[in-house]
Structures are given as C-alpha cells and as structure tokens.
Amino acid sequence: MMEEKVEVKTPEYVSLKFEPAGLGSRAAALIIDQAIITVVALLILFITFLGVWGFDMYLGLGSVSPYLILGVVIVMFILNWGYFAGLEYFWNGKTIGKKILGIHVMQENGHRITLLSSVIRNLMRIIDQLPAYYVLGMIMVYAHPKHKRLGDLVAGTIVVHERRAKSKRMSRLDKEIQRRNLKSGDLKIEEWNMKQLNERDWTLLKGYAERFTNLPLEKRNELTKKIATILFPKLELSKEQKTYEQLENALLILYLKLRDEWEYEL
C-alpha cells in the first residue's frame, strides 16, 4: 500500500512532500504526553500536600489558603497547556510523545511552527477534547484529508512524519567533513538564532557545501567569506579574526545542523 502524501508549497516556491501523521500515531503520542503531564502533576500535588500538611501541623492551622489553591490551579493550567505549546515551539514542533513516535508539527507552508501558531493550536485543545477524551479531535483527524484537528485548522499547522534524507554512499563532501572531524554539536547556536534561517539560506548553504571540494582555493576562500557574511549575522556569530579554515569549518558544521531539517526525500 502506497503511503499517503501531502504536497506543501513553501513561500520560496519549493514543493515538499510529507506523509501526514494519522490518528494512530497522534493518539499514541498524546497518550505518552498525557502520562508525563499526569506524573508531573501528581508530584506537584504530592509535594504541595506535604508542604501544607507540615505547615499546618507546625502552626496548628486547620484550613488551606485559597491563594494556595489558586496557585495550584494556575500551575496545573500552565503545565497542561504550556507543556505542548512550549515544547512544540522550542523543540521544532515536537513534544516528547511526538519525538518518540517520529512526528512533528509545522506550518502548512513548510516552515517551523511559530510561537503564535503553537499557542493557538494548543489552546484549541479545550474544544478538541470535547465532549471527553478528545472525541471531537479524533473524529476530525480521522475524517480530514490531511488528518487535521480543529487546532490545526485554526493555526494553519499540520502534523507530519519525520523524513530522512536520501540514503547514499559517502560523498566527497562527507569524506572531507569526516577528515576534519566535524560534528553538528561542535558549533553552539541558540535555538532562537537557528529559527532565523529560512529555506533560501539552506539552499545557499547547501550549494556552497556541494561545490566545496571542487572549488580552487582562491575561489573557495572568496565564496566562504561571502556566505559567512550573509549567514553569520543571523546566528550572532562573528567572522572577525577567524582564518578561512575556521570559517569553512563553521559553515560545514552549520550545513550538518540544517541537513536533517531541510533535506527531505521527495
């Protein structure tokens, strides 16, 4: 049976094909996330109860402050709704459950989910979970051609399966990266700065990397300086007082960081 695909048109007029996440994988991810939230909530209640009980025993009080109850309610609300919105925004569309199931949320234009979209789609869970246990949400995911719940429709998002880059033999570029012993974790860049890069930046960097081993030294140095001048300010990286080799290494590491995100098997 052929996998169902959806085609996403990016603002850069690039077509990307994804497999939308169906009811089974989304429900399994939600069960994992809800289990985590439940465990954390029980721990918070347990610690709060122990603290209040000990305080009352010490002072001989017999009632719980309404402010404490209000505080616990607020914390529970933040935990239940902030868990999804926060993780999806800061972790590239993934929660722990989605990560385990190999799915993630993205904008319908192919870009990373924005903070506003993440907040909107997760606040809509209040409706999606009606009348109980996400019955409305499950019906919509099952019936919608792109497996969207109400939150996805309102926020303009879609949940898709992770895609792996095309498998291929080690290229000259990969051998050069291996020779230099470069790894994606060698360059520390804040997640917020990584979000400043778009598909046009990736296309520019990919073209540089693919031509890297074939360029004569003088031309390579010139291109390295130009690419670093374009990309480094977005990442708050400085190219001053760096040798050409250090600039090359930084760009190649950045290429490794972005490759898994942008290089899809079409």
Image: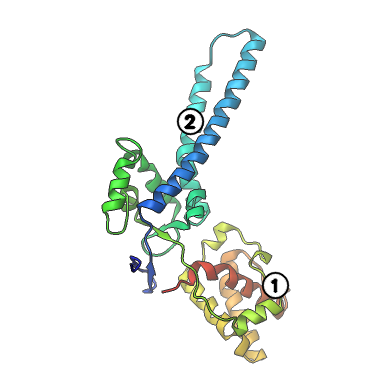
Q: Nearer the viewer, mark 2 or mark 1?
A: 2
Instruction: Identify the residue at horizontal 66%, vertical 90% (top origin).
Output: 218
Q: Contact, CB < 8 Å: mark 2 with mark 1?
A: no
Residue 117 in view, yes or no:
no
Please state the horizontal and vertical placement of residue 73, each as a whole percent of the image: 47, 28
- How far apart are labels 2 and 1 at the CA level? 48 Å
Place of residue 48 in the rendered image (x, y in percent of width and height, measured from the top left): 58, 24
Amino acid residing under circle 1:
Glu
**Vertical position of residue 214 compared to residue 236: above or below:** below
In the displayed structure, does residue 44 sit left or right of residue 246? left
The answer to which image quadrant residue 129 occupies is top left
Please identify the quarter of the rendering in which residue 45 is found: top right
Residue at label 2? 74
Q: Say which residue appears at 28% left-offset and 49% top-offset.
A: 140
Quarter of the picture containing the C terminus is bottom left
Q: Extreme bottom residue here?
A: 216
Provide residue 114's location: percent of width, then percent of height.
44, 55
First of labels 2, 1 by sequence position? 2
Quadrant of the image containing the N terminus: bottom left
Q: How far across and down, in percent of the image, does residue 245 sit? A: 71, 79
Q: Is residue 119 above or below residue 242?
A: above
Left or right: where does residue 99 sit relative to residue 241?
A: left
Q: Residue at x 66, y 77 (%)?
A: 177
Using residue 72 as the reference point, say whether residue 248 is left or right of it.
Answer: right
- In the figure, 15 relative to 137: above or below? below
Q: Which residue matches tag 1? A: 240
Local SS, label 2: helix
Horizontal side of residue 175 vs 132, given as left or right: right
Residue 124, above or below 48: below
Judging from the image, what secondary structure is the residue with disc 1 in? Answer: loop
